[in-house]
Amino acid sequence: MSYKRKKLWEPSNEWIKNAEATRFIEFINKEYNLNIKGGKDLYRWSVEKIPDFWEAMWKFSGIIASKPYYKAVEDLSVFPGTKWFPGAKLNFAENLLKYKDDQLAFIFQGETKVSKQITYAELNKTVSRLAKSLKEVGVKVGDRVVSYIPNLIETPVAMLAGAAIGATWASCGAELQPSAVIDRFSQIKPKILFTVDGYYYRDQVFDIRENAKVVVDAIPSIEKVIVVTYASEGKCDVSEIPKAVNWEDFISKEEDPPLEFEQLPFDHPIYIMFSSGTTGKPKCMVQSAGGVLINHLKELILSTDCKRSDVLNYITAPSWMMV
């Protein structure tokens, strides 16, 4: 028996005309005097002219940098280990916070049916306030800031605040047991830990403050613990967690403090991710700020045709990398 194949979906001419990939093709045709006509041609060019493709992606996506690169890549034959966009200085958080208007940046919907929202204007101010407080407790370029927390709005706020001042971020979801968190974070000697009083799962509350205490006791490099209230009524009690302070008490009271973004090399480490740990302790995988930034822009703009008016939905814990 033969089956006739049926397309699940086919873009309309209007969709193709307005697609970001179409705009990108028009851009590179003009920039490089090409005659690329569609996706297959674009793919072929991207793998045959790798430096040109990534330089075009940099320009097309509008990456903010305080110093320009002098070439897209030093030597493609050196793998791994070649330098991408040498000479460039930029800040990961500055690029993510370039909008400061009243459009929504995050919408949080918890299992408790509680929803929170934050605009780009509010996000910028909140990140600035938190970055100021982190600098005041001694966080500097290269320090590790980590979280043991669910996927709340405060989670990316903490990441952005750390990134703004040059810190490197790593995260574990609140559902992990202390031993799993210790196996990961003890390798990277974090200075600051963001955590939470608890989380909800299937209408049950799981208080993790005791777990957080175990983690802090096991990792002496942690100098300060900032606790977000999520599962408690009112401000949660953090007295049993060493070096702990509530988020509300830690974040600067200044409404909109100035924020000077640290300008760093393209390959400055932004994230430390971890393998699953099935063959011993989880292995650390360091991701560069510029690499993550330009790859995300490429995926969102070209692969998913994401525009500012669109909404991306993530239902996951911060223990996992989603692609």
Image: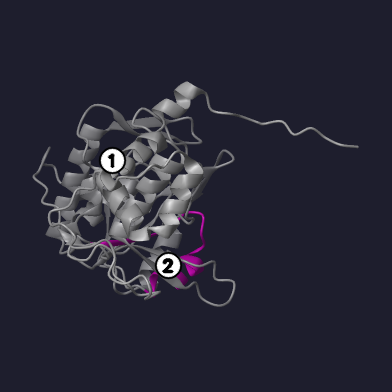
Residue at the spot 36% in from the left edge and 27% down from the top edge? 309
Q: Quadrant of residue 83?
A: bottom left
Instruction: Please give left or right for residue 120 compared with residue 171 in the image.
Output: left
Residue that numbered label 1 is attached to: 30
Side (left or right) of 102 relative to 77: left
Quadrant for the N terminus in the image: top right
Residue 180 counted in the magenta span:
yes
Q: Is residue 202 magenta?
A: no
Residue 212 falls in image quadrant: bottom left
**Upstream in sequence: badge 1 or badge 2:** 1
Instruction: Tell me the magenta residue range.
Output: 167-187
The residue under label 2 is: 214
**Disc 2, SS:** helix
- Determine contact: label 1, label 2, CB under 8 Å: no
Which picture quadrant has residue 291? bottom left
Nearest the eye: 211 or 79: 79
Depth order, front residue of 78/317? 78
- Three-letter code, disc 2: Val
Q: Is residue 226 left or right of residue 36?
A: left
- Look at 22% across and 63% down and name the residue there: 71
Which residue is depicted at the point 46% across and 25% down?
15
> Which percent across, then down, holds residue 251?
20, 47
Percent across and percent down for residue 235 are 31, 42
Q: Is residue 257 above or below residue 116?
A: below
| Residue 215 coordinates in the image, percent (x, y) | 41, 67
Give the total number of marks visible in the rendering: 2
Asked whether residue 204 is in view, the answer is yes
